[in-house]
Amino acid sequence: MSTENEGNPVPPAPSAPPVPVASPAVSPQAGPPHGDAPTTPLPPVPPGAPGASEYGAAPAAHTPADPSGTPQAAGPAPDASWPPPPPATPSYADGGAGAGNTGWGSSYQPPAPKPRGGRGGLVAAVLVAALVAGGLGGGLGYTLAKNSDDAGSTTVSATDSGSATQVKRSPGTIAAVAAKSLPSTVTIEAESTSGEGGTGTGFVFDTQGHIVTNNHVVADAVDGGRLTATFPDGKKYDAEVVGHAQGYDVAVIKLKNAPSDLKPLALGDSDKVAVGDETIAIGAPFGLSNTVTTGIISAKNRPVASSDGSASSKASYMSALQTDASINPGNSGGPLLDASGAVIGINSAIQSSSSGGLGGSGQSGSIGLGFAIPINQAKYVAQQLIKTGKPVYAKIGAVVSLEDSTDGAKITDQGQSGAAPVEAGGPAAKAGLKSGDVITKLDDSVIDSGPTLIGEIWTHKPGDKVTITYKRGGQEHTAEVTLGARAGDEPNG
């Protein structure tokens, strides 16, 4: 199993295979031909695919002859308006090149006539008969319908019954939650100085214009790139990165010239979430802004390690909320809501079959395994980023192996760049932990690997006291550890 970010494969991640929700690449957008056109171009119809030539010129039907050789009347000719012309939008045309382009691909070119045998005449006769029968059936149906209308309708519309023209929905419905929450979400476009970038989602964190999202959504714009945030009403704002935490995969951006009527989304309590609770995800999957999907909490405390797949990439770790709400590339950074509309997580990663995404872009899609950063953790990180611009991580002061394992998190024999694996005077050293010890539990949480331990530690704050269970020489021991702190993004420890 593998992880990926922005659609790129990465080396296997120990014990935690899911992948971040990639952000589709930003591309120049042509103005839609109509106001109701999709937010992103739909894929072209491949040559030879069903429907690619349905609206071109049709071959003429063969008129059969009777045995005497006298041509027979073919009956009423099919209605000239059939088949109907293709709709004006969306256009699947390849730019309109060539004469006779219908807008749904190249026009149909009938094959060269072939010698007609007796069986060919029979096929043509059946075709003509079918067309005639279709015409008669259509005309008869229209006549009956018209006569029925003239006799008076027996249907009753909502307005006829005296009810309000607008449907009223109770506050607890999904539609009501979506209507209330959508205005506080944004579609984020990040572009690097070289023109590379992607699309993701974010939500209003406070009235000062701070927007919370994923680190991997804004990573391209961190070093001098361009960042914009667009609300569902179409209003678009330039933004800047306030702070980003690669390890947590959380970032905060701030709108420039933020409006005064911002409405932050209410934050829930992710610790109180239960398996089976309803979830609502909002985002821009494959660039389709303001998309709402639903599901449930499938699991809690799911260890997840993810990366963008680049050689210099550092992994992000979380003890995630798992949901089956449909989450796809572009949903990254969007809110995961509970049934009341409170944010319980930030959508960040998916496990995918890697079968390719919308329009054959090669990006992975949802198979019902989505992962969100618990909002209690994300809130703490966001507040630190707003306050200092840097993340603060809890730590035990020991380097653990990131190799795939199910036995626990082993403290390595050597630390980073030749340093000691256990920090002198650090939390682990004070608790008596040594190189070679295998940590199997942190409080009541089972630890099966290094990434699981890191993700679990990062759900805590510096200064928290935790109980660590570990094995040394086949014997099990426990130790109480007071977590230390470090600022900025660094390797595990």
Image (tube, rainbow, N blue to C red):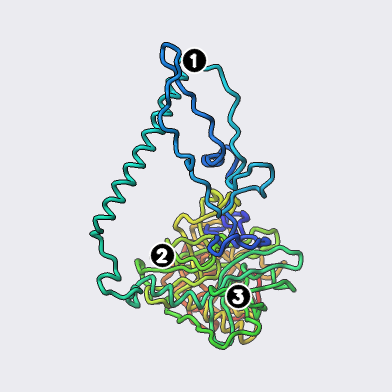
Instruction: Inspect this view and state whether residue 270 appears.
Output: yes
Measure the C-alpha gap from mark 3 to mark 2.
24 Å
Q: Earlier in the sequence, mark 1 or mark 2?
A: 1
Please give left or right for residue 385 compared with residue 324 in the image: right
Type of the residue with mark 3: Ala
Secondary structure at badge 2 equals strand
Dot 3: few (<14), some (14–19), or many (≥20) neighbours within 10 Å?
A: many
Nearest to viewer (mark 3 / mark 2):
2
Disc nearer the start of the sequence (3/2): 3
What residue did someone put label 3 on? 251
- 3 and 2 marks in contact (CB < 8 Å): no
Please tell me the numbered disc located at residue 294.
Answer: 2
Q: Is 17 on the left or on the right of 157, as rendered?
A: right
The label on residue 117 is 1
Q: Nearer the viewer, mark 3 or mark 1?
A: 1
Q: For the residue labelled by badge 3, is the local secondary structure a helix, a strand or a loop?
A: strand
Image location (x, y in percent) of residue 396? 57, 75
